């Protein structure tokens, strides 16, 4: 009796070991899915697309990618403040001359941009563009004087943009810039194009900002969060994501260092100077547009107020690296981090 139960225990153990081994083999050898990928320069940055396809779907995917890039071109022509003939530039040129009719899609994005202004109590402000002249990060960059900042700041206040239907009026000297939100919107539109073509498992990336739809074959999509003081391939975390957008705003993307001070492209509209509470803010959200606007807005709000805002919003998570290099997370963020956080990946205070 006893020996029989020992024997069956051994058999059971062997079975379990076999099962674990086969699972491990599966994990290290997942069937790699068939992927159609493409890369292109647009909106001044690199765009990458990966689509999971079935056999025989390659041509269909290539056609979808073609449409996707056409869509991105269309959005750039509509919303780029760098093109003098774009509808947004024409609106800015007409500031102070009364209501201007703009294409409905542009009016809608401006309206949502103003809503993010209200949500972040002015930390995200599409009228920041009046400051563009003093914050141009080219080779001739020099820090502006406090007087210059003060002067330009009198043309920044999202509450002074008047919007009625598709007619918008800007006070004299005002200008709207959609650089903090348009890329997110473009990523969402790109994802919509792929869905219209019948694909549901794909990853769209524009300059590091991402929407991941479905899965990459047998597993979720993996994306990295950059070390703001490292090189492009130095990561502080790897995230496993499915049907979610991941957008990072960082002080390392466009900047100049003068006399040891880092000046960068995320401007605090309340002071007119680059926001200095964070090195980077990564936001996870259901749309790339929301993630994009919030990454910029939370960066300006700083870690404390920024996290408070994120905790109030459903379906939004944040990972902030503050000005000292400390890591802060919203309540649900760590569930996306791959592997057990270690000292090298996440700080020792997290376990
Ligand atoms: P990117 O991913 O292109 O680096 P971010 O999403 O980090 O852009 O936002 C920075 C961009 O947003 C700036 O280049 C500028 O166009 C715009 N911007 C800067 N400060 C603000 C602000 N306080 N509110 C809204 N937009 C801003
Ligand atoms: Mg942004």
Image (cartoon, helix red, strand yellow):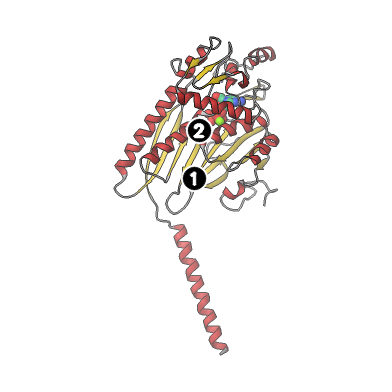
Left or right: 282 with respect to 261?
left
**Which residue is label 2 attached to?**
184
Q: For the residue with label 2, is its CB less than 8 Å from the closest atom of ligand 2?
A: yes
- Residue 193 lies, in percent from the top left, at 39, 36
**Which residue is label 1 attached to?**
243
- Residue 35 lies, in percent from the top left, at 37, 46
Q: Quadrant of ligand 2?
A: top right
Disc 1 secondary structure class: loop
* Residue 326 can be seen in this image: yes
For the point 66% across and 15% down, the residue is 149
Looking at the image, which residue sits at the far front? 165
Figure check: 310 above or below 10: above
Between 114 and 38, the one nearer to me in the picture: 114
For the point 41% across and 42% down, the residue is 50
Disc 2 secondary structure class: helix
Q: CA distance from mark 1 to mark 2?
A: 15 Å
Q: In terms of image quadrants, where is residue 234?
A: top right
* Classed neighbour count for the residue bearing mark 1: other residues with Cα under 10 Å, few (<14), some (14–19), many (≥20): some
Q: Quadrant of the N terminus?
A: bottom right
């Amino acid at each position: 009796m006893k020996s029989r139960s020992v024997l069956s225990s051994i058999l059971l153990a062997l079975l379990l070991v076999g099962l674990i081994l086969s699972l491990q083999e599966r994990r290290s050898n997942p069937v790699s899915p068939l992927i159609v990928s493409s890369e292109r320069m647009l909106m001044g940055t690199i765009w990458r697309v990966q689509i999971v396809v079935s056999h025989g779907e390659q041509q269909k995917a290539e056609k979808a990618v073609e449409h996707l890039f056409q869509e991105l071109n269309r959005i750039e022509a509509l919303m780029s403040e760098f093109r003098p003939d774009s509808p947004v530039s024409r609106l800015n040129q007409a500031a102070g001359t009364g209501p201007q009719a703009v294409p409905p899609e542009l009016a809608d994005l401006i309206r949502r941009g103003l809503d993010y202004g209200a949500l972040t109590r002015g930390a995200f402000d599409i009228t920041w563009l009046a400051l563009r002249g003093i914050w141009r990060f080219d080779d001739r960059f020099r820090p502006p004087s406090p007087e210059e900042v003060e002067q330009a700041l009198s043309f920044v206040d999202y509450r002074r943009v008047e919007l009625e239907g598709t007619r918008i009026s800007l006070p004299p000297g005002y200008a709207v810039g959609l650089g903090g939100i348009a890329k997110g919107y473009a990523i969402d539109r790109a994802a919509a194009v792929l869905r219209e073509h019948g694909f549901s498992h794909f990853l769209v990336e524009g300059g590091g900002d991402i929407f991941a739809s479905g899965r990459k074959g047998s597993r979720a999509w993996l994306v990295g969060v950059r070390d703001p003081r490292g090189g492009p391939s130095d990561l502080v975390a790897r995230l496993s994501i499915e049907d979610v957008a991941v957008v990072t705003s960082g002080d390392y993307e466009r900047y100049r260092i003068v006399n040891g001070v880092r000046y960068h492209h995320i401007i605090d509209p309340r002071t007119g100077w680059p926001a200095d509470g964070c090195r980077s803010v990564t936001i996870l959200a259901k749309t790339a547009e929301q993630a994009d606007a919030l990454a910029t807005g939370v960066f300006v709000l700083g870690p404390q107020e920024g996290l408070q805002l994120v905790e109030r919003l459903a379906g939004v998570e944040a990972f902030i690296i503050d000005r000292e290099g400390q890591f802060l997370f919203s309540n649900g963020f760590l569930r996306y981090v791959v592997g057990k956080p270690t000292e090298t990946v996440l700080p020792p205070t997290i376990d």
